Amino acid sequence: MLGEGHPELLVLDGPTTGLDPLMQEEFVTVIDEYRDRGGTVFLSSHDLDEVERVCDTVAIVRDGRIAAVENVAELRGRAYHHVSIEFDAPVDEREFASLPGVTEIEVDRSRVSFKAFGDLDAVVKAPARHTVKDLEVAEPTLEEIFLTFYGRNGT
């Protein structure tokens, strides 16, 4: 339990912005200790990694009201991945358009980029038929997840 003179609630807005990785880890350690003593943390951030390291639950705020409350791990599990693959030569985008969960395909010469929802197994196996020069898989920001699951225009 928190001792006298220690707040029961911390409200933080982007607390690790500008911190080097070592200090970010120290921040997370301090926050974990604070939570272990019974403290509550409200954290405002667009950095999903930061939120996931510090929080168990995320509230999505829309028009000044809480639009959704989600477990962070469950929210991440429903999200998509940004995938970008560079090949040694151009490939037919139809190879990727037919994959389950693949949307918004863009082709720029020998680079294919798209969003992939769900299981990535087929997305990983499909490029293996070609020579892959570069492969990037990135998770969306919390803002992108919000826009995907809760509507771009509040719908």
Image (cartoon, rainbow, N blue to C red):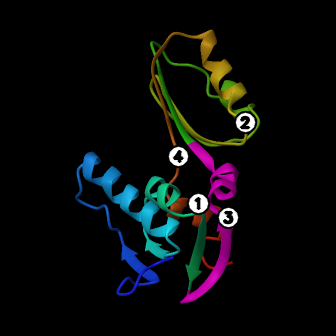
First along the sequence among labels 4 and 3: 4
The kind of residue tagged 4 is Glu
Residue 26: image quadrant is bottom left
Q: Start and end of the magenta stretch? A: 63-81
Local SS, label 4: loop
Which residue type carries mark 2? Answer: Asp
Is 82 on the left or on the right of 118, as rendered?
left
User: At 56% from the left edge and 19% from the top edge, which residue is drawn?
Assistant: 91
**Image marks 1 and 4: residues in contact by CB distance under 8 Å:** no
Is residue 140 magenta-colored? Answer: no
* Residue 90, position as x, y percentages in the image: 50, 18
Where residue 5 sits: x, y (%)?
Answer: 35, 87
Depth check, front residue: 112 or 33: 33
Residue 119, numbered circle: 2
Kind of residue indicated by mark 3: Phe
28 on left or right of 78: left
Q: Amino acid at mark 1?
A: Ile
Separation (CA) of disc 2 from disc 3: 18 Å
Residue occupied by mark 1 = 145
- Taking the spot 49% from the left edge, 70% from the top edge, the residue there is 37
Circle count: 4
Element at badge 2? Answer: loop
Say whether disc 4 or disc 2 marks the residue closer to the N-terminus. Answer: 2
Circle on res. 139: 4
Distance, label 3 to label 1, CA atoms, is 6 Å
- Please provide percent x and percent y for residue 105: 59, 39
**What is the number of the mark on residue 41?**
none
Few, some or many residues within 10 Å of mark 2 (<14, 14–19, 20+): few
Q: Are marks 3 and 1 in contact (CB under 8 Å)?
A: yes
Mark 3 or mark 2, which is nearer the start of the sequence?
2
Task: Look at the image and tell me whether residue 46 can be seen.
Answer: no
